[in-house]
């Protein structure tokens, strides 16, 4: 069977990462499926060349023609809109345009990968489900103000919270539970003790949780969640939270498993999905075969799962684990792989 896949190479290290992941994809599906790739333009480079962050018609094709899209990181520090915000970041365009409301961010420790945590912190394997279409980031670029003050609005709708909380509980049903105790749980992360819209998020969470009596409903204030993700990560199975909190806490989680270069994500809605690393385009590393492509390779594994190619997806994850666990690939203290970007892809392909 042929699956049509969109490819957005992005900026900075994006093209190297997407090339590495594509090599892995091809080896992973060999004999089982055909992937046909369709390149689309997107990111800061596209914005600088055309004044638009995405190529003409690309959003429509990503939404309707491709089974899924693999996207590299985007953004270049020098490419800005007149108001000073970064141009060519596709979050608003693609996440909003596809209504991809659930940003699925697995945080999973791989044995052999150096982290700042003590070994007795135990295994780490949880998923942050970040609301992806509203919250504080709805006002991307739309804040109001003058030279004395600025304000950005944080919006929560019942519809928006309900659907992302359901996505989190549905995901918990498909997982083996928290590493510490095997309990399936969804942790609602908010600041309901201070901010009313977060109290509304928690209220809707509690209502939806009643539909899932088999899953434990758990709570953390966001500040304590940051603490506990570092101190007691084994407690967590699935966490669900507003957009801005999810952006920040997923980077905190990444630090506990070897850095941003280890962490994939999926932007998933009811129509259309795309998969990308959770990090930026690291322009200073670009073109030097230095960036860690694991985040992109694991994003490709999530894409395979989305296509229903669950065996190849599992094999990719196992190959990545084995590449690190065996010592064939290791990271320095800044997360740079010793064998280079291409070397990581080769080590993964060799195991496949
Ligand atoms: C992420 C990124 C994006 C975001 C940026 C690049 C717009 O940090 O995917 O987490 O803020 O959502
Ligand atoms: Mn981020």
Image (spheres, grey):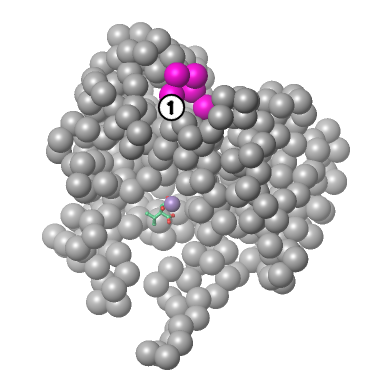
Q: Secondary structure at mark 1?
A: loop
**Residue 194 visible to the viewer:** yes
Residue 113 lies in the magenta stretch? yes
* Quadrant of the rendering where the N terminus is positioned: top left
* Quadrant of the rendering where the C terminus is positioned: top left
Give how far across and how far down residue 22 sits, in percent: 28, 26
Q: Is residue 180 above or below residue 39?
A: above
Write down the residue under mark 1: 114
Residue 3 lies in the magenta stretch? no
Residue 77, quarter of the rendered image? bottom left
Residue shown at 59%/37% (left/top)?
127
Residue 18, quarter of the rendered image? top left
Camera-side residue of 276 and 38: 276
Total numbered badges shown on the rendered structure: 1
Q: Residues within 10 Å of mark 1 (few under 14, many from 20)?
A: some
Residue shown at 33%/13% (left/top)?
328
Q: In the picture provided, is 19 more to the left or to the right than 329?
A: left
Mark 1 CB in 8 Å range of ligand 2?
no
Q: Which residues are magenta?
A: 109-114
Residue shown at 68%/62% (left/top)?
191
Give how far across and how far down residue 113 sits, in percent: 43, 24
Q: In the picture provided, is 348 more to the left or to the right than 223?
A: left
Q: Is residue 285 above or below residue 114?
A: below
Camera-side residue of 165 and 345: 345
Residue 40, quarter of the rendered image? top left
What is the magenta segment's predominant secondary structure?
loop
Residue shown at 60%/57% (left/top)?
242
Q: In the picture provided, is 267 more to the left or to the right than 9?
A: right
**Residue 170 visible to the viewer:** no
Q: Is residue 346 above or below residue 132?
A: above
């Amino acid at each position: 069977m042929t699956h049509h896949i969109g490819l957005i190479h992005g900026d900075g290290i994006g093209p190297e990462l997407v090339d590495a992941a594509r090599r892995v994809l091809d080896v992973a599906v060999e004999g089982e499926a055909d992937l046909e790739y369709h390149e689309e333009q997107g990111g800061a480079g596209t914005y600088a060349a055309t004044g638009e962050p995405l190529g003409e018609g690309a959003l429509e094709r990503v939404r309707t023609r491709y089974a899924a899209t693999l996207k590299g990181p985007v953004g270049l520090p020098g490419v800005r809109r007149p108001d000073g915000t970064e141009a060519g970041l596709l979050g608003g365009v693609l996440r909003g345009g596809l209504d991809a409301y659930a940003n699925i961010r697995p945080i999973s420790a791989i044995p052999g990968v150096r982290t700042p945590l003590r070994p007795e912190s135990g295994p780490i394997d949880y998923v942050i489900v970040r609301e992806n279409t509203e919250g504080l980031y709805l006002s991307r670029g739309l804040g109001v103000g003058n030279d004395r003050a600025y304000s950005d609005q944080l919006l929560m709708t019942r519809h928006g919270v309900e659907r992302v909380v359901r996505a989190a509980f549905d995901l918990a049903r498909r997982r083996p539970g928290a590493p510490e105790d095997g309990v399936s749980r969804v942790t609602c992360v908010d600041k309901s003790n201070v901010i009313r819209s977060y109290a509304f998020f928690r209220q809707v969470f509690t209502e939806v949780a009643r539909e899932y009596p088999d899953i434990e409903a758990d709570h953390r204030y966001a500040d304590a969640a940051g603490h506990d993700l570092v101190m007691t990560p084994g407690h967590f199975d699935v966490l669900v939270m507003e957009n801005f909190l999810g952006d920040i806490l997923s980077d905190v989680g990444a630090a506990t498993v070897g850095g941003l270069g280890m962490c994939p994500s999926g932007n998933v809605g009811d129509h259309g999905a795309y998969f990308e690393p959770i990090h930026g385009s690291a322009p200073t590393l670009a073109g030097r075969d230095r960036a860690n492509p694991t985040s992109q390779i694991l994003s490709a594994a999530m894409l395979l799962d989305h296509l229903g190619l669950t065996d190849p997806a599992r094999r990719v994850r196992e190959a990545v684990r084995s590449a690190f666990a065996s010592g064939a690939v290791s990271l320095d203290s800044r997360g740079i792989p010793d064998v280079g970007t291409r070397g990581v892809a080769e080590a993964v392909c060799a195991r496949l």
